[in-house]
Image (tube, rainbow, N blue to C red):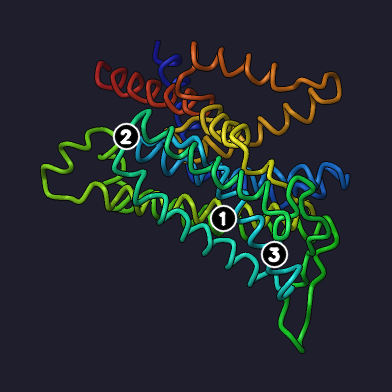
Amino acid sequence: MEGMASGKKLLTRLAERLTGRFGVTALLILAVLAPFLVQSDYYIQLCTEILIASLLAISLNFLIGYTGLVSLGHAVYLGVGAYAFALLTKNVYPSMWAGLIVAGASCALLAWFMGIFCVRLAGLYFAMLTLAFSQVVYTVAYYWRDVTGGDDGMLGIPKPEIGIPGAFSISLESFTNFYYFVLIIVATLIFLSWKIANSPFGRVLQAIRENPERVEFIGLPVHRYKLYAFIIAGTLGGFAGGLYSTFQGYISPDLLYWTQSGEIVLMTILGGMYSFLGPAFGAGLLLYIRDTVLNFMEYWRIVVGSILVLLVLFLPGGILGFFEGWISRLSIGGDHGDARS
């Protein structure tokens, strides 16, 4: 019995490390080494897309996981950020940093405008209003051919060099160089998101998710906190859109369509919306499934939909959420065992 208890305790410590700082550090090291491990331009591009999708999913989780607001129009930030980056770098000023700043700022402004109307609602009404806003923007992008290219989209979006003028410059045309650039940007934004999520502001958001009436009763402005969360989510989504625009070199109104929003929600649920890194895990898993299944069948969404049904039925907390819950139960069991001994 004593050997079994010590083995269980060892397993608990190992599991806690894997989901704690040790696990995050190991994941970061793996991300840094990825281009050397895969040794293929195709898979380097897939890893780059996973990084961008991870940022997008984590941005949505500020609404779903932390504030309890289910947005069905989050793709609006992906699309608007992508178009803002493309229009600036292609037609005005070919600067990577300026393009990303404009992408984030334009989506922050859009999120502020949408949030004024949306955060006063909750549940289904909130979800449907976000969907309606995104479809309005999609329609504008589809028919405003002079600016967006309409259903033909925009081609030839550049990957501007980065560096210090007159000192040095780094070309991002190389798949590996661009991967590391995206990794630095995404890791920085995810770290800032983590700091916000674990700040007093983040804890207020979680309290709003659990009981908004009680938070309002103690005197905190619930609508204002929701609006701030909405703006943060939109800004991060805008940065993801800017990165996606220069990554693909081509964008179309399809980025704004409601099915794209559904995929972002699916990433969040798949990994675990109550775990900070769960949506990133879900993004990687979804894109890997898409990439694998597409080799065998065209309708990969059927496979993904089936997985989602199974998750909702058996793992409602998502895959990473289930794993973290298992660790928590294991830890409690280990503590009880120590107390009895």
Question: Residue 202: x and y, percent?
Answer: 33, 48
Secondary element at image label 3: helix
Q: Residue furthest bottom?
A: 166
Of callouts 2 and 1, the N-terminal one: 2
Residue carrying label 1: 238
Distance of label 2 from label 3 (alpha carbons): 34 Å
Given residues 203 and 252, the one toward you in this image is 252
Residue at x 74% of width, y 70% of height: 91
Question: In front: 329, or 137?
Answer: 137
Residue 282's image quarter? Answer: top right
Q: Amino acid at mark 2?
A: Ala
Q: What amino acid is at disc 1?
A: Gly
The location of residue 166, given as percent across then percent down, is 77, 89
Image quarter hosting the C terminus: top left
Label 3 or label 1, whichever lies nearer to me, is 3
- Please provide percent x and percent y for residue 279: 54, 36
Q: Is residue 23 visible?
A: no
Q: Which residue is mark 2?
A: 122
Contact between labelled residues 1 and 2, with CB atoms less than 8 Å apart: no
Which numbered tag is attached to residue 87? 3
Q: Bin the neighbour count of mark 2 within 10 Å (Cα to Cα): few under 14, some 14-19, many 20 and up.
A: some
Residue ID at (62%, 17%): 307
User: Separation of disc 3 and disc 1 at Cα?
Assistant: 14 Å
